[in-house]
Amino acid sequence: MSSTLTSIGAILLYLTATALLFYRFNALRHAPCTGPFCGKKPVMGLTLLALLLHAIALSQDIFLAPGLNLGVTNAASLITWLIALILVLANFRLPLDSLIAIFLPAAALTLLVEQVIPSHHIVSADISNELKLHILISILAYSTLTVAAIQSLIILVQDRHLRSRQPGGLIRALPPLQTMETLLFQIIAIGFTLHTIALATGLLYIENMFAQHLAHKTILSIIAWSVFATLLWGRHYHGWRGRTAIRWTLSGFALLFLAYFGSKVVLEMIIAR
């Protein structure tokens, strides 16, 4: 099966699962949801099947004979796939339906863009296993901290609705604000640990991290690491929470976004032309 057909199947399943989630959120506006599509199993089943098809499409587009094709659109699709996978697996123990409802359409969108606007940035198959490990950990770190950024935005919206005493269906479906904040810092701690390992492996295994095409990426990544380190320090010693935590989270993520996708866009879509 071609990657295009596989992608279409995954996109349709993602959107169907999203529709079921919003059906549940809408039902919660009036009473506890008790319909046949209110449980987790239908949504999780569709999502897992979508993730499988998405993974097949990614493997066909990324694993090429010359090496790994980690162009902008492929990388974006891979990252949203990883985020969705992390959320779905964690959702069996944690209340993450709201995050999943946001990321499934994002995964569908990046998969569509990957097919419509293919990009090419080949990472040679001859690179060392250590460098492959660095790339994998970097992508995992970025994916996890992306989840934290979206979680912080949901907390901001939740806080505003609670202050105005107008909780909608989606807000009513969310866990208590304190639980949401605790989950946010757990996600940040995991992402920060992965980001620390990514920087350390980069320093160890990349011959010159401050080379011409890596300098700005390295500097922005280090600054982002400092932002998240400060946030975790503030949380531990001063109990930072609420909008303070949200500002620091979004600032750190913005730096990471510029470091990763900003550099890829400039190098692959502007300089390459």
Image (tube, rainbow, N blue to C red):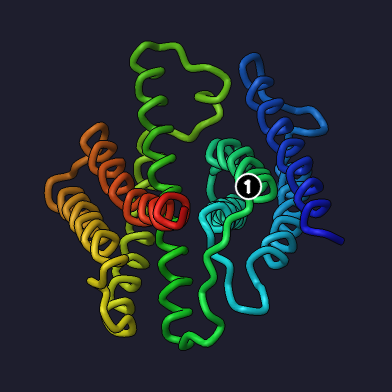
Mark 1 packing: few (<14 Cα in 10 Å), some, or many (20+)? few
| Of residues 10 and 91, the one drawn nearer to the viewer in this rendering | 10
Tell whether 219 sits left or right of 112.
Answer: left
* Closer to us: 18 or 31: 18
Report the quarter where the N terminus lies: bottom right
Give the residue displayed 53% in from the left and 49% down from the top: 94
Q: Is residue 86 visible?
A: yes
Residue denoted by label 1: 117
Residue reaching furthest to the front = 273
Total number of numbered labels?
A: 1
Given the current orientation, which residue lies at the most extreme left position? Answer: 238
Residue found at x 75% / y 51%:
7
Instruction: Give coordinates of residue 18: x percent, y percent.
Output: 68, 35
Tell whether 271 sits left or right of 23.
Answer: left
**Residue type indicated by callout 1:** Ile
Tell me: 239 left or right of 123.
left
**Horizontal side, residue 20 vs residue 143: left or right:** right
Q: Position of residue 237 (x, y in %)?
A: 13, 52
Q: Residue furthest right?
A: 1
| Residue 17 percent location from the top left of the image | 73, 39
- Residue 69 coordinates in the image, percent (x, y): 58, 67
Q: Quick check: 150 above or below 121?
A: above
Say what secondary structure mark 1 lies in.
loop
Front in this rendered view, residue 215 or 46: 215
Residue at the (39%, 33%) spot, across then down: 153
Quarter occupied by residue 195 = bottom left
Q: What residue lies at 61% left-to-right and 16% top-to-bottom?
A: 29
Q: Is residue 93 visible?
A: no
